[in-house]
Image (cartoon, rainbow, N blue to C red):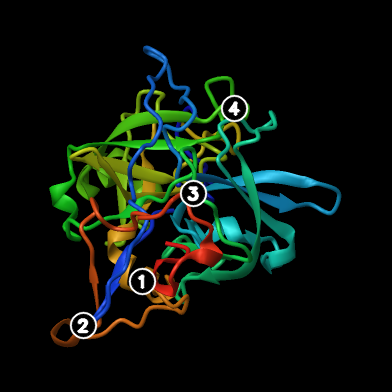
Amino acid sequence: MGHGVPYYAIAVLVPLCFLLAASTTFAQTCGKRKVVNFLIVNGTEAKDGHWPWHVALFHNNARSFVYACGGTILDQNIVLTAAHCLMTASGLIARERLVVQVGRNRLRVASQRAQEHEALELIVHPDYNVNGIQHDIGLIKLATDITYTNYIQPICLWNRGEDQNAIVGLRGTVIGFGYDETDTPTDTLREATIPVVSSITCIESNREAFATQLTSEMFCAGGRDGVGACNGDSGGGLFFQYDDVWFIRGLVSFTKPRQDALICDTREYTVFTDVAKYLRWIEQHLRGKTGQPVVIETDNNRKIALLPTATCGVNPYPGRDESSKPVLLGYP
Protein backbone atom coordinates (compact mmCIF):
# COMPACT_ATOMS: atom_id res chain seq x y z
CA MET A 1 0.00 0.00 0.00
CA GLY A 2 1.44 3.30 -0.85
CA HIS A 3 -0.42 5.91 -2.73
CA GLY A 4 -3.76 6.60 -4.49
CA VAL A 5 -5.71 3.97 -6.48
CA PRO A 6 -6.30 3.45 -10.26
CA TYR A 7 -9.34 5.14 -11.68
CA TYR A 8 -10.83 2.06 -13.28
CA ALA A 9 -10.91 0.59 -9.78
CA ILE A 10 -8.51 -0.63 -7.18
CA ALA A 11 -8.57 -3.46 -5.30
CA VAL A 12 -10.97 -4.45 3.12
CA LEU A 13 -15.28 -8.40 6.30
CA VAL A 14 -17.09 -7.85 9.66
CA PRO A 15 -19.61 -10.01 11.36
CA LEU A 16 -22.95 -8.54 12.08
CA CYS A 17 -24.15 -10.36 15.20
CA PHE A 18 -27.79 -11.13 15.48
CA LEU A 19 -30.22 -12.07 18.21
CA LEU A 20 -33.34 -13.87 17.03
CA ALA A 21 -36.46 -13.07 19.00
CA ALA A 22 -37.42 -15.48 21.76
CA SER A 23 -34.03 -17.18 21.77
CA THR A 24 -30.56 -16.73 23.22
CA THR A 25 -27.50 -16.69 21.00
CA PHE A 26 -23.78 -16.62 21.60
CA ALA A 27 -21.69 -15.00 18.89
CA GLN A 28 -18.09 -14.20 18.14
CA THR A 29 -17.00 -10.78 19.37
CA CYS A 30 -16.33 -8.60 16.33
CA GLY A 31 -13.80 -5.87 15.73
CA LYS A 32 -11.50 -6.97 18.56
CA ARG A 33 -7.79 -7.65 18.25
CA LYS A 34 -6.74 -10.80 20.06
CA VAL A 35 -2.99 -10.26 19.66
CA VAL A 36 -1.28 -7.47 21.57
CA ASN A 37 1.78 -6.03 19.86
CA PHE A 38 3.03 -2.85 18.30
CA LEU A 39 3.40 -1.42 14.82
CA ILE A 40 6.75 -0.45 13.35
CA VAL A 41 7.52 3.09 14.51
CA ASN A 42 6.93 5.62 11.73
CA GLY A 43 6.36 2.75 9.32
CA THR A 44 3.44 1.26 7.44
CA GLU A 45 3.95 -2.47 7.91
CA ALA A 46 1.38 -4.17 10.12
CA LYS A 47 2.28 -6.76 12.74
CA ASP A 48 0.69 -10.19 12.77
CA GLY A 49 -2.77 -10.15 14.27
CA HIS A 50 -3.37 -6.40 14.02
CA TRP A 51 -5.89 -6.76 11.21
CA PRO A 52 -7.30 -10.26 11.72
CA TRP A 53 -10.39 -9.52 9.59
CA HIS A 54 -8.45 -8.74 6.41
CA VAL A 55 -8.48 -11.34 3.64
CA ALA A 56 -6.62 -11.76 0.36
CA LEU A 57 -8.52 -12.69 -2.80
CA PHE A 58 -6.81 -14.67 -5.55
CA HIS A 59 -7.96 -15.19 -9.14
CA ASN A 60 -6.97 -18.23 -11.18
CA ASN A 61 -5.51 -16.97 -14.45
CA ALA A 62 -5.50 -20.47 -16.02
CA ARG A 63 -2.03 -21.37 -14.83
CA SER A 64 -1.88 -20.21 -11.24
CA PHE A 65 -3.69 -18.18 -8.62
CA VAL A 66 -2.72 -14.51 -8.66
CA TYR A 67 -3.41 -11.96 -5.93
CA ALA A 68 -6.27 -9.69 -6.99
CA CYS A 69 -7.90 -7.76 -4.14
CA GLY A 70 -8.54 -7.41 -0.45
CA GLY A 71 -11.65 -8.20 1.55
CA THR A 72 -13.01 -8.30 5.09
CA ILE A 73 -14.47 -11.08 7.23
CA LEU A 74 -18.06 -10.38 8.26
CA ASP A 75 -18.84 -13.76 9.75
CA GLN A 76 -17.57 -17.31 9.43
CA ASN A 77 -19.26 -17.70 6.06
CA ILE A 78 -19.26 -14.26 4.41
CA VAL A 79 -16.52 -11.96 3.12
CA LEU A 80 -17.11 -8.36 2.05
CA THR A 81 -15.25 -6.86 -0.91
CA ALA A 82 -15.68 -4.54 -3.89
CA ALA A 83 -17.89 -5.75 -6.73
CA HIS A 84 -15.18 -5.11 -9.31
CA CYS A 85 -12.94 -7.56 -7.44
CA LEU A 86 -15.34 -10.32 -8.47
CA MET A 87 -15.19 -9.41 -12.14
CA THR A 88 -13.07 -10.27 -15.15
CA ALA A 89 -13.05 -8.75 -18.62
CA SER A 90 -15.87 -11.11 -19.57
CA GLY A 91 -18.05 -10.57 -16.51
CA LEU A 92 -18.49 -12.24 -13.13
CA ILE A 93 -15.60 -14.58 -12.41
CA ALA A 94 -16.46 -18.26 -12.03
CA ARG A 95 -16.51 -19.16 -8.36
CA GLU A 96 -14.10 -22.03 -9.06
CA ARG A 97 -11.53 -19.46 -10.13
CA LEU A 98 -11.57 -17.52 -6.87
CA VAL A 99 -9.87 -18.41 -3.60
CA VAL A 100 -10.02 -16.57 -0.27
CA GLN A 101 -7.11 -16.68 2.16
CA VAL A 102 -7.49 -15.43 5.72
CA GLY A 103 -4.92 -14.96 8.47
CA ARG A 104 -2.16 -13.82 6.12
CA ASN A 105 0.28 -11.05 6.92
CA ARG A 106 2.64 -11.92 4.06
CA LEU A 107 1.65 -12.64 0.47
CA ARG A 108 4.64 -14.67 -0.63
CA VAL A 109 5.57 -16.37 2.63
CA ALA A 110 3.63 -19.43 3.78
CA SER A 111 2.03 -19.27 7.22
CA GLN A 112 0.57 -21.99 9.41
CA ARG A 113 -1.88 -19.39 10.71
CA ALA A 114 -3.48 -18.90 7.31
CA GLN A 115 -6.62 -20.65 6.07
CA GLU A 116 -7.80 -21.06 2.49
CA HIS A 117 -11.45 -21.21 1.49
CA GLU A 118 -13.19 -21.70 -1.82
CA ALA A 119 -16.24 -19.70 -2.86
CA LEU A 120 -19.70 -21.21 -2.82
CA GLU A 121 -21.47 -18.15 -4.21
CA LEU A 122 -20.48 -14.70 -5.46
CA ILE A 123 -23.01 -11.96 -4.74
CA VAL A 124 -22.71 -8.61 -6.51
CA HIS A 125 -25.02 -5.71 -5.68
CA PRO A 126 -27.95 -5.87 -8.13
CA ASP A 127 -27.40 -2.27 -9.26
CA TYR A 128 -23.70 -2.68 -10.01
CA ASN A 129 -22.70 -2.34 -13.66
CA VAL A 130 -19.42 -3.86 -14.78
CA ASN A 131 -18.85 -0.82 -16.99
CA GLY A 132 -19.42 1.62 -14.14
CA ILE A 133 -18.26 2.34 -10.61
CA GLN A 134 -21.51 2.83 -8.72
CA HIS A 135 -22.65 0.31 -6.07
CA ASP A 136 -19.18 -1.20 -6.06
CA ILE A 137 -19.84 -3.75 -3.34
CA GLY A 138 -20.01 -7.52 -3.28
CA LEU A 139 -20.06 -10.54 -0.99
CA ILE A 140 -18.39 -13.93 -1.12
CA LYS A 141 -20.25 -16.81 0.47
CA LEU A 142 -17.68 -19.42 1.41
CA ALA A 143 -17.94 -23.14 0.77
CA THR A 144 -16.47 -23.87 4.22
CA ASP A 145 -16.66 -21.93 7.46
CA ILE A 146 -13.76 -19.84 8.70
CA THR A 147 -12.27 -21.01 11.98
CA TYR A 148 -11.65 -18.06 14.25
CA THR A 149 -8.25 -17.81 15.93
CA ASN A 150 -6.21 -15.04 17.53
CA TYR A 151 -5.13 -14.11 14.01
CA ILE A 152 -8.48 -14.56 12.25
CA GLN A 153 -11.44 -12.52 13.49
CA PRO A 154 -14.52 -10.78 12.04
CA ILE A 155 -15.00 -7.03 11.81
CA CYS A 156 -17.97 -5.09 13.12
CA LEU A 157 -20.34 -3.49 10.66
CA TRP A 158 -20.81 0.25 11.03
CA ASN A 159 -23.55 1.11 13.55
CA ARG A 160 -23.30 4.89 13.85
CA GLY A 161 -25.67 6.03 11.13
CA GLU A 162 -25.30 6.98 7.48
CA ASP A 163 -24.49 10.68 7.84
CA GLN A 164 -21.26 11.26 5.95
CA ASN A 165 -20.77 14.70 7.48
CA ALA A 166 -20.25 12.96 10.82
CA ILE A 167 -17.06 11.28 9.60
CA VAL A 168 -15.56 14.21 7.68
CA GLY A 169 -12.28 15.07 9.36
CA LEU A 170 -12.01 11.72 11.12
CA ARG A 171 -8.98 9.56 10.42
CA GLY A 172 -9.54 5.95 9.46
CA THR A 173 -7.12 3.14 8.68
CA VAL A 174 -6.96 1.46 5.28
CA ILE A 175 -4.99 -1.78 4.88
CA GLY A 176 -3.88 -3.98 2.03
CA PHE A 177 -1.19 -5.66 -0.05
CA GLY A 178 -1.28 -2.97 -2.72
CA TYR A 179 1.54 -1.11 -4.46
CA ASP A 180 4.04 0.70 -2.27
CA GLU A 181 6.20 3.77 -2.90
CA THR A 182 8.27 1.78 -5.42
CA ASP A 183 5.17 1.10 -7.56
CA THR A 184 5.35 -2.63 -6.91
CA PRO A 185 3.03 -4.89 -4.89
CA THR A 186 4.08 -5.24 -1.27
CA ASP A 187 4.67 -8.65 0.26
CA THR A 188 3.77 -7.50 3.77
CA LEU A 189 0.34 -6.24 4.78
CA ARG A 190 0.51 -2.48 5.13
CA GLU A 191 -1.64 0.18 6.70
CA ALA A 192 -2.20 3.89 6.26
CA THR A 193 -4.14 6.34 8.40
CA ILE A 194 -6.00 8.84 6.25
CA PRO A 195 -8.60 11.59 6.83
CA VAL A 196 -12.10 11.62 5.37
CA VAL A 197 -12.89 14.74 3.34
CA SER A 198 -16.19 16.21 2.22
CA SER A 199 -17.58 15.48 -1.22
CA ILE A 200 -17.20 19.16 -2.12
CA THR A 201 -13.52 19.10 -1.18
CA CYS A 202 -13.05 15.93 -3.20
CA ILE A 203 -14.80 17.28 -6.30
CA GLU A 204 -13.02 20.63 -6.16
CA SER A 205 -9.68 18.84 -6.01
CA ASN A 206 -10.28 17.38 -9.48
CA ARG A 207 -13.60 18.09 -11.15
CA GLU A 208 -12.74 16.10 -14.24
CA ALA A 209 -12.08 12.97 -12.21
CA PHE A 210 -14.73 13.17 -9.51
CA ALA A 211 -17.55 15.59 -10.41
CA THR A 212 -19.45 13.13 -12.59
CA GLN A 213 -18.49 10.03 -10.64
CA LEU A 214 -19.25 10.67 -6.97
CA THR A 215 -22.64 9.64 -5.62
CA SER A 216 -24.19 9.71 -2.16
CA GLU A 217 -23.13 6.07 -1.76
CA MET A 218 -19.45 7.05 -1.94
CA PHE A 219 -17.05 9.21 0.06
CA CYS A 220 -13.46 10.37 -0.35
CA ALA A 221 -10.48 10.04 1.94
CA GLY A 222 -6.74 10.58 1.80
CA GLY A 223 -4.07 13.12 2.55
CA ARG A 224 -2.86 13.63 -1.03
CA ASP A 225 0.59 13.28 0.51
CA GLY A 226 1.75 9.97 -0.89
CA VAL A 227 0.01 7.87 1.75
CA GLY A 228 -3.14 5.93 0.98
CA ALA A 229 -4.65 3.06 -0.98
CA CYS A 230 -3.19 1.94 -4.30
CA ASN A 231 -3.43 -0.78 -6.94
CA GLY A 232 -4.11 -4.07 -5.22
CA ASP A 233 -5.85 -2.50 -2.24
CA SER A 234 -9.27 -2.59 -3.91
CA GLY A 235 -11.98 -4.28 -1.87
CA GLY A 236 -10.11 -3.65 1.36
CA GLY A 237 -11.72 -1.72 4.16
CA LEU A 238 -11.44 1.67 5.78
CA PHE A 239 -11.74 1.11 9.53
CA PHE A 240 -12.52 3.31 12.51
CA GLN A 241 -11.98 2.46 16.16
CA TYR A 242 -14.43 3.29 18.94
CA ASP A 243 -13.82 2.12 22.51
CA ASP A 244 -11.28 -0.49 21.40
CA VAL A 245 -13.69 -1.94 18.82
CA TRP A 246 -13.05 -1.63 15.08
CA PHE A 247 -15.80 -0.95 12.54
CA ILE A 248 -15.74 -0.95 8.75
CA ARG A 249 -17.17 2.12 7.01
CA GLY A 250 -15.60 2.13 3.55
CA LEU A 251 -14.46 -0.18 0.75
CA VAL A 252 -11.57 0.89 -1.48
CA SER A 253 -13.13 1.49 -4.89
CA PHE A 254 -11.22 3.82 -7.24
CA THR A 255 -9.18 6.95 -7.85
CA LYS A 256 -7.66 8.76 -10.78
CA PRO A 257 -4.41 7.16 -12.01
CA ARG A 258 -1.25 8.96 -12.98
CA GLN A 259 -1.09 10.21 -16.55
CA ASP A 260 1.91 8.06 -17.40
CA ALA A 261 0.54 4.74 -16.12
CA LEU A 262 -2.48 2.94 -14.71
CA ILE A 263 -1.02 3.32 -11.24
CA CYS A 264 -2.55 5.30 -8.41
CA ASP A 265 -1.77 9.00 -8.24
CA THR A 266 -0.53 10.05 -4.81
CA ARG A 267 -1.89 13.55 -5.40
CA GLU A 268 -5.49 12.37 -5.67
CA TYR A 269 -8.08 11.28 -3.13
CA THR A 270 -9.28 7.70 -2.91
CA VAL A 271 -13.00 7.02 -3.37
CA PHE A 272 -14.63 4.51 -1.04
CA THR A 273 -17.96 2.72 -1.27
CA ASP A 274 -19.92 3.76 1.82
CA VAL A 275 -20.72 0.51 3.63
CA ALA A 276 -23.23 2.30 5.87
CA LYS A 277 -25.49 2.82 2.85
CA TYR A 278 -25.68 -0.92 2.17
CA LEU A 279 -26.24 -2.43 5.61
CA ARG A 280 -29.71 -3.78 4.89
CA TRP A 281 -28.52 -5.38 1.67
CA ILE A 282 -25.59 -6.97 3.51
CA GLU A 283 -27.82 -8.19 6.34
CA GLN A 284 -30.03 -10.03 3.88
CA HIS A 285 -27.12 -12.29 3.03
CA LEU A 286 -25.70 -12.85 6.49
CA ARG A 287 -26.97 -16.08 7.90
CA GLY A 288 -29.01 -16.27 11.09
CA LYS A 289 -28.51 -18.67 13.95
CA THR A 290 -29.94 -21.53 11.92
CA GLY A 291 -27.46 -20.95 9.12
CA GLN A 292 -30.08 -19.43 6.82
CA PRO A 293 -30.10 -15.91 5.39
CA VAL A 294 -31.53 -13.42 7.85
CA VAL A 295 -34.92 -11.98 6.93
CA ILE A 296 -35.10 -8.24 7.50
CA GLU A 297 -38.39 -7.15 9.04
CA THR A 298 -39.84 -3.66 9.32
CA ASP A 299 -38.71 -1.54 12.26
CA ASN A 300 -41.94 -2.05 14.18
CA ASN A 301 -41.88 -5.81 13.78
CA ARG A 302 -38.24 -6.82 13.86
CA LYS A 303 -37.34 -10.43 14.42
CA ILE A 304 -33.68 -9.61 14.80
CA ALA A 305 -31.69 -7.01 16.67
CA LEU A 306 -28.05 -6.14 17.08
CA LEU A 307 -26.28 -7.47 20.12
CA PRO A 308 -23.82 -5.34 22.07
CA THR A 309 -20.35 -5.80 20.60
CA ALA A 310 -19.01 -6.81 24.01
CA THR A 311 -21.17 -9.95 24.16
CA CYS A 312 -21.91 -10.69 20.53
CA GLY A 313 -20.57 -14.07 19.55
CA VAL A 314 -18.61 -15.09 22.62
CA ASN A 315 -18.02 -18.84 22.71
CA PRO A 316 -18.93 -19.99 26.25
CA TYR A 317 -17.29 -23.40 25.82
CA PRO A 318 -14.14 -22.87 23.73
CA GLY A 319 -12.58 -26.12 24.95
CA ARG A 320 -15.45 -28.41 23.99
CA ASP A 321 -15.78 -30.24 20.72
CA GLU A 322 -18.61 -28.86 18.57
CA SER A 323 -20.31 -32.25 18.35
CA SER A 324 -20.67 -32.40 22.12
CA LYS A 325 -22.28 -28.98 22.51
CA PRO A 326 -26.02 -28.32 22.77
CA VAL A 327 -27.49 -27.29 19.43
CA LEU A 328 -27.87 -23.67 20.47
CA LEU A 329 -24.22 -23.43 21.47
CA GLY A 330 -22.63 -25.16 18.50
CA TYR A 331 -20.46 -23.22 16.08
CA PRO A 332 -20.94 -19.77 17.63
Which quadrant of the figure contains the C terminus?
bottom left
Q: Which mark is residue 302?
A: 2
Observer-side mark, 4 or 1, equals 1
Identified by mark 1, the residue type is: Glu
Q: Nearer the viewer, mark 1 or mark 2?
A: 2
The residue where tag 4 is placed is 186
Marks 4 and 2 sit apart, C-alpha to C-alpha, by 45 Å
**Spatial separation of the CA atoms under disc 4 and disc 3:** 26 Å
Residue contact between numbered discs 4 and 2, judged by CB atoms under 8 Å: no
Tell me whether the residue at label 4 lies in contact with that at label 1, contact meaning CB atoms closer than 8 angstroms.
no
Relative to 174, is 248 above or below?
below
The earlier-in-sequence mark between 4 and 3 is 3
**Residue that mark 3 sits on:** 148
280 vs 16, nearest the viewer: 16
Residue visible at 34% across and 58% down? 313
Report, in whole angstroms, how far the alpha carbon at label 1 lies from the one at label 2: 13 Å
- Looking at the image, is mark 3 or mark 2 earlier in the sequence? 3
Label 4: which secondary element: loop
**Residue bearing the label numbered 1:** 283
Distance of label 4 from label 1 (alpha carbons) = 33 Å
What amino acid type is highlighted by mark number 4? Answer: Thr
Say above or below: 256 vs 122. Answer: above
- Where residue 95 sits, quadrant-wise, is bottom right
Q: Residue furthest right?
A: 63
247 vs 170: above or below:
below
- How far apart in space, not on screen, are marks 3 and 2 (Cα)? 29 Å
Q: Residues within 10 Å of mark 1 (few under 14, many from 20)?
A: some
Badge 3, how many Cα within 10 Å: few under 14, some, many 20+?
some
Query: Which image quarter: residue 106?
Result: top right
Determine the residue positioned at 48% across, 55% down.
320
Residue type, label 3: Tyr
Q: Position of residue 170 (x, y in %)?
A: 19, 38
